[in-house]
Image: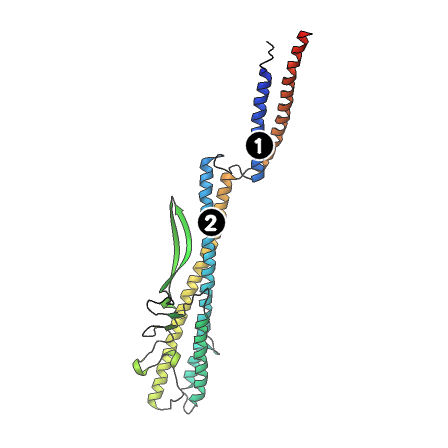
């Protein structure tokens, strides 16, 4: 039956064209965004997982930045400790050599003291300069209840993980007392180089003075005590430097792991939401042809009503 009011063929062609146009729009969106799941309506489950993983990656990026700051801080303190240990021309090593030289009978110890004083001042200057981002672990303020007091420990953020909805932040704890060379603010100095050895008549590495010593047995014994004190200090500073070296190595390992983990998360998100551009390009070409055919079919269906006019001629 030919109907003027109802054109079934045109309706079918129009429905097909609408479907093709919808698919074509979806394909063009995937091509323009590069994602097959760009909104929750595309795939609620995948979109939710991808969003959470992107959030985790942002947290890992922050951890990576924090590790960079921590590495710079540790490297600064480590370099200063090595400088304090010194070599045959500087630091504790040179100080030890000067004290051994001072054991020589008849030597002018006042001239040796001039070198000792310079080394003491240089070591203190090095410790005070070992500051990065306002943090110094070698010259610390132990003043109680003070805004300038150095914390007893620092937590260096090292990792981030999330199981279910529970995040976990990993950290490396650094105890400042293990690296302190000089301390201020407390009733008693407790740093490696400013701790007094030998009671009220003793001295710290920072206050050793040999200018007035003689060749007497008592003064020679005092020199022996100073030499032993410096030797102990060298071992203590070396131990602190070795500890920081281990921390430095751990930070480096964690940095590489975090970067690798971020890449893995990116790949995981890509597997969930990225569009296969080869597949999308093929689909686009097919849908464009279908759209053209749909338009052609709709045009033919619309023209079929013209044949009704011939019945009334």
Percent across and percent down for residue 180 are 38, 70
* Residue appearing at x 43%, y 85% in the figure: 113
Q: Quadrant of residue 74?
A: bottom left
**Viewer-proximal residue, 90 or 101?**
90
Dot 2 or dot 1, earlier in sequence: 1
Task: Name the residue carrying label 1.
Answer: 25
- Whole-percent x and y of residue 24? 58, 31
Left/right of residue 13 with respect to residue 253 in the rendered view: right
Please name the residue shown 41% across and 83% down the image: 99
Which numbered marker is on residue 157?
Answer: none
Q: Quarter-wise, where is residue 45 in the image?
A: top left
The answer to which of 231 and 266 lies nearer the viewer is 266
Q: Is residue 104 above or below residue 33?
A: below
Find residue 1 and report its horizontal and vertical position in percent. 59, 9
Q: Residue furthest bottom?
A: 106
x and y percent of residue 100 in the render? 41, 83
The residue that mark 2 highlights is 58
Separation of disc 2 and disc 1 at Cα?
31 Å
Query: Which mark is in front, 2 or 1?
Result: 1
Residue at 41% x, 49% y is 161
Query: 24 or 284: which is nearer to us?
Result: 24
Location of residue 126 with respect to 311 vertically, above or below: below
Mark 2 Cα-neighbour bin, 10 Å: few <14, some 14–19, many ≥20: few
- The outermost residue toward the left is 199
Give the image's coloring scheme: rainbow
Q: Quadrant of residue 239?
A: bottom left
- Residue 119's place in the image compared with 50, above or below, is below
């Amino acid at each position: 039956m030919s109907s003027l009011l109802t054109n079934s063929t045109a309706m079918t062609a129009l429905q097909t064209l609408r479907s093709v146009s919808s698919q074509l729009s979806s394909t063009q969106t995937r091509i323009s965004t590069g994602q097959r799941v760009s909104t929750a309506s595309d795939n609620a489950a995948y979109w939710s997982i991808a969003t959470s993983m992107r959030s985790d990656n942002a947290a890992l990026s922050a951890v990576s930045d924090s590790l960079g700051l921590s590495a710079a801080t540790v490297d600064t303190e480590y370099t200063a400790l090595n400088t304090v240990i010194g070599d045959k021309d500087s630091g504790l090593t040179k100080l030890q050599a000067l004290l051994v030289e001072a054991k020589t009978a008849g030597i002018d110890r006042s001239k040796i003291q001039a070198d000792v004083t310079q080394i003491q001042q240089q070591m203190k200057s090095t410790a005070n300069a070992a500051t990065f981002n306002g943090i110094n672990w070698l010259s610390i303020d132990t003043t109680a209840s003070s805004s300038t007091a150095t914390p007893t420990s620092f937590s260096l953020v090292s990792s981030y993980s999330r199981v279910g909805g529970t995040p976990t932040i990993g950290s490396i704890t650094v105890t400042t007392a293990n690296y302190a060379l000089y301390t201020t603010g407390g009733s008693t100095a407790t740093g490696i180089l400013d701790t007094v050895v030998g009671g009220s008549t003793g001295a710290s590495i920072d206050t050793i003075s040999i200018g007035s010593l003689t060749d007497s047995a008592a003064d020679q014994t005092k020199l022996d005590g100073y030499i032993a004190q410096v030797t102990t200090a060298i071992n203590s500073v070396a131990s602190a430097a070795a500890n920081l070296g281990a921390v430095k190595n751990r930070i480096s390992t964690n940095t590489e792991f975090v970067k690798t983990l971020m890449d893995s998360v990116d790949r995981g998100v890509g597997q969930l939401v990225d569009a296969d551009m080869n597949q999308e390009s093929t689909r686009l070409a097919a849908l464009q042809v279908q759209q053209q055919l749909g338009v052609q079919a709709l045009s033919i269906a619309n023209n079929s009503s013209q044949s009704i006019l011939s019945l009334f001629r």
